[in-house]
Image: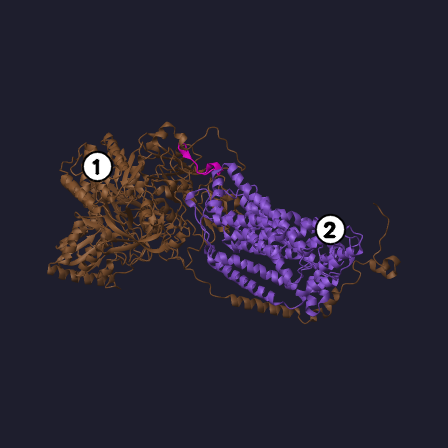
Amino acid sequence: MESNKKYWKGLEELNKTPEFIENNKNEFAEPIPIEDILEGDGLKAKTPRRDFLKALGFGVGAVSLAACQKTPVHKSLPYLIKPEEVTPGVANFYVSSYDGQAILVKTREGRPIKIEGNPGDLFGKGGASATVQASILDLYDSSRLKNPMQDGGETGWQQVDAYIKGQLTAIKTGGKKIRIVSATVNSPSTQAVIADFVTAYPTTKHINYDAVSYTGIIQANQNSFGKAVLPHYNFDAADVIVSFGADFLGTWISNTEFNRQYASRRAAKALEAGKMSRHIQFESGMSLTGTNADVRMPIKPSEEGIAIISLYNALTGTTLPGSKKVSDANTDKAITLAAKELLAAKGRALVVSGSNDVAVQVLVNAINSLLGSYGTTIDLDNPSYQYKGNDQEFVDFIGEMKRGEVDAVFFLNANPAYDYYNANEFKDALKKVRLKVSFAPYSDETAALCNVVAPNSHFLESWGDENAVEGYYTIVQPAINTVYNTRQAEVSLLTWADAPVKDYYTYVRNNWNTNILSKAGLSGQQGWEKVLQTGFVKAAAKPATAYTFGRDLNAVVTTILSHSQQLAASGDKKLELQIYVSNNIQDGKKANNPWLQELPDPVSKVTWDNYAAMSIKTAEKLGIQEGDYINIKSGNYTIELPVLLQPGQAQGTISVALGYGRTKAGKVGDNVGKNAYPFLALRNGTLQGTTVVDIEKTSTLRYVFAQTQTHNSYEGRPIIHEGTLVEYKKNPAAIVGKKEGKEDYSLWDEYERPQYNWVMAIDLNACTGCGACIVACNAENNVPVVGREEVRNRREMHWIRIDRYYSFNGGGSEPVTKEKEINKLADLDHVSVVHQPMLCQHCDHAPCETVCPVLATTHSSEGLNQMTYNRCVGTRYCANNCPYKVRRFNWFNYWNDSRFENYMQNEYTELVLNPDVATRFRGVMEKCSMCVQRIQAGKLKAKMEKRPLQDGEIKVACQQTCPTNAIVFGNANDPNSEVSKALKSERTYYVLEELNTKPGIGYQAKIRNTTEIGA
Amino acid sequence: MASHSESIIREPLITGKNITYAQITNDVLFPVENKPNKAWWIGFTLASLGAMLWVFAISWTFWFGIGEWGLNKTVGWAWDITGFVWWVGIGHAGTLISAVLLLFRQNWRNSINRSAEAMTIFAVICAATYIFGHMGRPWLAYWTLPLPNQYGSLWVDWNSALMMDVFAISTYFSVSLVFWYTGLLPDIASIRDRATGLRRRIYSIFSFGWTGSVKTWQRFETVSLILAGISTPLVLSVHTIVSFDFATSLEPGWHTTIFPPYFVAGAIFSGFAMVQTLLLIARKVLGLENYITMFHIESMNKIIILTGSIVGVAYLTEFFIAWYSQSEYEQYAFINRSTGPYWWAYWSMMTCNVITPQLMWFKKIRTSIPASWVLSIIVNIGMWFERFVIIVTSLHRDFLPSSWVMFYPTWVDVSIFIGSIGVFFTMFLLFLRVLPSVAMAEVKLLLKSSSEQAKKKLIEHGHLDKEQVEFYKESLTKYDSVELADYDKA
């Protein structure tokens, strides 16, 4: 609307006064007093310009002065002369050897940070066990002795040398005995050193003392075949394996090697070739090996001998005098069946027993001889030197000490004050010895009783060699100077013996030059350098020959039966106790290693404790529930342990792990669990881990185990697919329930992955659940140790875990996997187990990525799900939304919170941290990165060398250490990569694939070689 | 409006004899203009002790880390988000009362909207403390805002429900605050006009120069209406978005399309319960029986029974859908809720939210002040359990049984929650002391038309249907602030 109306702003405008008209010409109605300000009083105001400048000047000056504090000095010293071989940021690898196994030591800027298997190694072929992986942390262990000790006080090496030499000279004149007690020494150079020492002091004798010995087998071989050796087993040559309590995948003799051999007959290739082995296990407690068996029969320790006799009878068709049947009819049936299968697989069969009883092992020898195992699955001609200890020798040694015949004793890697069954007798006898020297790197239980502790260096600080199997020599090479003021035991011995060559490097080299290099056709400087590159020499193996057992078995059977009778627990509250070696901390020597303490037991998933494993039925009968404390009493020795209800445990038995209850292991290992060594019994000249104990419920309190998994069944969910070999042969695809014509619908865009698509394949049939991958990942990725209480709070930080599920045979065709149905079952003894490594699945449609408000977790162009720690604000939404629950939150500042004595905080142990991986601050999420630092390093290396990346060139830490090659990693964009091939398997399925998260990790279904029994 | 009389059969919204505009001002401003009484001091002491506990516990958390709570690798949220959703839900009644009921011309809202809105604001503040408190690195909370930065293209994730939450809650808080404060202006001006000295100057500043002119009132009404229009969608959107935190995930028990309406109903349910909890006490202690009458109490109870029943239907629907979906994870989640290790939490929720509110069908119960108060507390408890059940029992057993865990709260979890109630009440009690707890100006609007005395006058004038008058009298029997004897005389 148009309007001609004029609006006036004031009466002046309406009236158009002359002043208004005049003023209206100006922009401003009133003049602005700029002139006044610039010329008049403006500059004479109270705060003139000069004053302002003065104040400003003073202010700036004062602030500058106040700020002139000394800048904190951060000393980071550059190399004045750069060592030729050290380039900051580039890792060096050195060959070395651990327990006879060839390894590679990764060092960064001069410090070892990771151990990896040597791909050429005879045992692991690149794989390495959790123990090997964890051993690097011991290098920096601040509980280690920092100086030699004399009479409880620190001293220097010169004083120690002077004192000991003086003593030894006196003892030599006195003519009394000198003893060197050590765990098995298979090092040729150490043996030579001891020989030199014996030459210098002729009354010296070397005693091999193994805390857990294999005397039974060694003696049995002596009896049966005249060869006192531990044979070298070939599980990969066995079509049928029957084990009586031998935990060969867990702790028995050479587990890394056995894992590899075993899996080679069960994983993808063996399956596809139709050569899957069959494994029948008879045992009391549930062992890692038992969890992998196709058929596992729980059997009491007292019946184990009877079962082996039955097997012998069934194999030969005869009846040994005095034989009886095992009490359980099913077990008896299983024995008959096992005999049938063993006979059918003659020459491709293997029977092993975990017993340390000579009689039992003789009978096993007889069986193996019957089956033609010698020369095929058992090699007596290239024996193992991993354990040489003879229990009787140590018993005799105590006798000698008691009689006052021993004047000096040296303990090398031996701790009988803790791990001898009758430690008190030993301690009393030791008092009579004049000179007691321990080479222990810790002030351990035995070292505490010695006059002198001459701490041995860690193997990563030492020269040396090992000969674990006939013809296989590995070199031990230092990767760092001694961290503390320690000295190799060999150097000490050479010094005290006044040997001509005291420098151990020269000594080892001379020894190799003269004795070892030639065995592999090497010689001189070139040969030595080659050894330092390969890490080992392998002489041509002697042909394995067949041995025939020809001795009378009657006496053996009588012994076995009488032992059985002694072991049979009768009466109220009496149970048969089975002692086993801890999967993680072994015989207790590893008790001070936090990585191993926090590694969940592969069966029970308990960390930081040992416990009394009991079957559910037995506990019910005794009115005991999980976590109840019981007193376990045998003779004068009693320990109080909480009860763990273990499916598969034989009724009427309990199992307790060795290695716990250390009192002088160090900060980490002291008073963790209870010592079970005193329960070992000396029978028939060997120490045996079975006995009868009295049980008594004590406290009303319930113990809460620090377990990483508390729900044990997979509830029939399609997260695990398993089938039998028969089903597999019929139709492998049916096992994983693959449907034809399934279409994918997705709301999300596909990511571009132009070059690489990093994925993984995990073969559930290869994974034995050993847990090596967990420790390897800890070491590679600086994963914090959180301690018992925090594991109990369910906050372990492991990036990879192994889910272990039990299922039961309910009589139907399908296994019973639902908790509610399991509770109704009458038979809880026959349990099947599946191990499933679980880690970030690197989903293509990752549920975690969409929910993060700040985009801290995103997808890479290479198929990785990345976690950006710096961006994370810690809402934990991603962890909630992760269906696999693999994300780990930093609840505390583990590297800086004084309430956690974490290895990441200690000024020594923190040196093990991988500089390529950031430690994480409190309040951020972390998870498996698929070792992105390794991927990056691999890509860079290829780029520098101007070549495409090869398949298999990048190995992630878990994959690399896995002795069974259960984990394959690689580029899915390359159709010829190992992982692409593995994922093409008909057994491949993706966990929770129905959620359409499109995981990057494909699992291959578990196949059990079950026939009518135990299906 | 005052010119024409309201139908006699409508129940009065203001009771009492000889109520005048001045009387209303006097009654409402009594706590503001006088020294606090003993009851207030007792309440304030308890509340501030609670607030101090909160300060201690939250400082403890910030110092040591979230690990001081009972959370673990599987249960990443528990008491924190339970508390957050609980407080946000409580806030909703305020917005519903002030916005939706205004649009629907429900005049009875005038007596309760002020306190309800204050409650909204304080509840949202409590909820916000959880947003910051639950973060692993709360000092970086500003990263959830889309702030330009020097890190290149670093931006926030608009797909994340938490991101939407940030905006939902901040919008909600700011709109609620503006709405509340706008409504307060005439009342603050009233205080100013009656005050002297410093008080007068302070209230003068906060009254934003309210003049009370017709133009001001007109604009005030317009702004109120506009803000009501803006707030109304918020009643629905805020808790819808809060429910997205769960609904957009793939956790069984969370991944549900029913969540938005179910959460909104639950929020209103819990909000009204909280209004009841507060006002039933406040009207007694502050002597506001004539303004917050039995009609108000009964109306709110009716809303509680309605929303409670909606929530109940939602619970049952969830079960049906879990069965109907044939998704084993979903089915297990619900079976586990009702029969798993946290069955007691589920059945507490069911009892408190679905079963006991049904007692409100009985007029005796819904018009009984003690019963209403007890039931309102029960609803508050039930709604806390609802969030606990949704969050913890879904998380603690989801897809992979290997990761199934239990959640146990620590003293810090409990202290922060109890402390947040302390913080809430501290703020609410301070509010009662400095601002009018009833919107005087709006209540005055009703005096001529909907008050008991106006109706009485009508009766005295005669010309009314006898039956209607009897009906009216009958309806007065439930009032605790009406003397029926007066009517017998009339």
Q: Chain of mark 2?
A: B
Q: Is residue A904 visible?
A: yes
Would you say the residues marked 2 and 1 are in contact, meaning their CB atoms lie under 8 Å apart? no
Region rendered in magenta:
A983-999
Q: Which chain is purple?
A: B
- Give percent across and percent down for residue A976: 40, 32
- Give percent across and percent down for residue B210: 73, 60
Q: Residue furthest front?
A: B488
At mark 1, the secondary structure is: helix
Q: What is the CA distance from the residue labelled 2 to the residue labelled 1? A: 98 Å
At label 1, the amino acid type is Ser
Residue tagged by mark 1? A310
Question: Which image quarter is the C terminus of chain A in?
Answer: top left
Q: Chain of mark 1?
A: A
Scheme of image coloration:
by chain
Q: Tell me: residue A475, above or below residue A273.
A: below
The quadrant holding residue B41 is bottom right
Q: Tell me: residue B432, above or below residue A324.
A: below
**Magenta stretch contains residue A988:** yes
Q: Tell me: residue A695, above or below residue A277.
A: below
Question: Which image quarter is the N terminus of chain A in?
Answer: top right
In the image, A25 versus B91, the foreground residue is B91
- Give percent across and percent down for residue A911: 36, 54
At mark 2, the secondary structure is: loop
In the image, A859 versus A75, the foreground residue is A859
Q: Which chain is brown?
A: A
Residue tagged by mark 2? B9
